[in-house]
Amino acid sequence: MEKLKRSLGSFIVPLLSIILAFVIGGIIMAALGANPFDAVKYLFQGAFGSKANIGTTLTKATPLMFTSLCACFAYKCGVFNLGGEGQFLMGSIAAFVTAYFSGVTGFAGVLLALLAGTLAGGIWGMIPGLLKIGRGQNEMIISIMLNYVATLFMGVLYTSWIRDASVPQTPAVDDLVKLPRVITGMRFTWGFVIAVVVGLVLYYVLFWTSGGFKLRAVGYNMTASRFNGIHVKRCMLTSFIISGAIAGLGGGAELLGTQFRLINGFGAGYGFDGVAMALIGQLHPIATMVVALFFAVLRVGSTTMQAATGVPTSVSDIIQALVIVFSVAGMALTKLPEFQAWKDRVFSKRKAGDK
C-alpha cells in the first residue's frame, strides 16, 4: 500500500502543473480572441480525433518516451546522464548500419538491428560512467560533449561515407527490416509498444526488486549506501549503461519505424526533452511515460487547434514551458522543511482520527 501511495504521489505535482499551465494558456487564448474551451477541444481532437491522428500522436510520443525513461532511470540512480541524445543517435546509427549491411531481413533482421542499437547506446553511456567512477570527471559535461560527437559522426555518414546519390542523407533501409505497424491504418509501430514495455520493466525493477532498491539507495544517499555494503561505483556504472541502452533502443526503433534513414536533424532535441519530461514525472517511470504522451499530444494537436481557431501553435509551446516551470517549482516546494512539517502534521492528524 505504501508503494502504491508513493506511486500515486508521483502524479500529483505533474497533474497540478498541467492544470495550471492550461489555465494560463486559456487566458492567453482568450486574450487572442479565441474561445479557450474550443481551442482545447480542437487540440485534443487533432491528437485523438481519428485513427490517423492517434497513430501520429503515438509515433511522436515513442522517441520521447525512450529518452525520458533514459533520463528517469539515470537520475533515479543518482547519476546525471545528459547524453541521452547522443546515445539515441548512436543507437540509430548502429541500427542503420546493421540493417543496411548485414543482409538479414524479416523478424531476425529487425531484432538484430534493435539489439545493435541497444548495445551502441549502452556503450556510449558507459563512457561518461567510466570516466566518472574511474577519474572523477564530471559526467554532465562529458555526456553533453558526447552528444556533439555522435551528431558529427552521423553527419559524416550521411554526407560522405553512406550518402545517397542525390541528397545529403543515407539510403533507406530495406522494407523487410522496418518495424511493422501495430494496427492497420494507424501510423504507430511496435516501437511504441516496446517503449511501454521498457517503462513497465523499469518500474518493476526499481520498486520491486532488491537490485532496484540498491540503485535507488545509491541515488538517495551514496555515503549511507557505501557504509551499508552497497557497491556504489558498480551501481553507478550499471545505471549509465542501462540508461544509455534505453536511449539506444529508442534510436533504433525510431530509425526502423519512422525515419528509415539517417538525415540532418534526426533525433534533434529528444535528449533534453527527455530530461525535462523525466523531471516533470518526478523520476517515476510510469508518470514519465504519461508526461511524454502528453507532450506529444500538445505538439500534434496544436496544428489542428491553429487551423480551427486561429490560436498559433506557439501557445502550445508556452503551455509546455509552463508545465516545466510549475513542475520544477512544485518539486522545490515539496523539498522545503516547512512543507514536510505541514505534511507530517496533516498525516499525523489523519492517523489520529482513524484511531
Image (tube, rainbow, N blue to C red):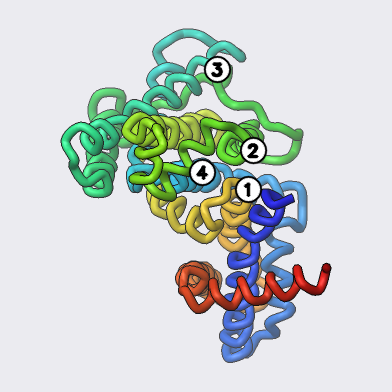
- Write the residue at 50% across / 9% down: 104
Q: Which mark is residue 200?
A: 2
Query: Which residue is denoted by mark 1 in the rendering?
Result: 286
Three-letter amino acid code of the residue under disc 3: Leu
Q: Secondary structure at mark 1?
A: helix
- Write the residue at 57% across / 43% down: 62
Q: In x, y percent, where is residue 50?
A: 77, 53
Q: Mark 3 or mark 4, which is nearer to you? A: 4
Instruction: Identify the mark nearer the N-term, 4 or 2.
Output: 4
Query: Which residue is denoted by mark 3 in the rendering?
Result: 111
**Left or right placement of residue 194 versus residue 170 in this view:** right
Three-letter amino acid code of the residue under disc 2: Leu
Q: Nearer the viewer, residue 213 or 151?
A: 213
Q: Are marks 1 and 4 in contact (CB under 8 Å)?
A: no
Which quarter of the image is occupied by the C terminus?
Answer: bottom right
Three-letter amino acid code of the residue under disc 4: Leu
Q: Mark 3 or mark 1, which is nearer to you? A: 1
**Left or right placement of residue 265 versus residue 326 in this view:** left
Query: Which residue is denoted by mark 4 in the rendering?
Result: 69
Q: In x, y percent, where is residue 249?
A: 48, 30
Q: Secondary structure at mark 4?
A: helix
Above or below residue 238? Residue 341 is: below
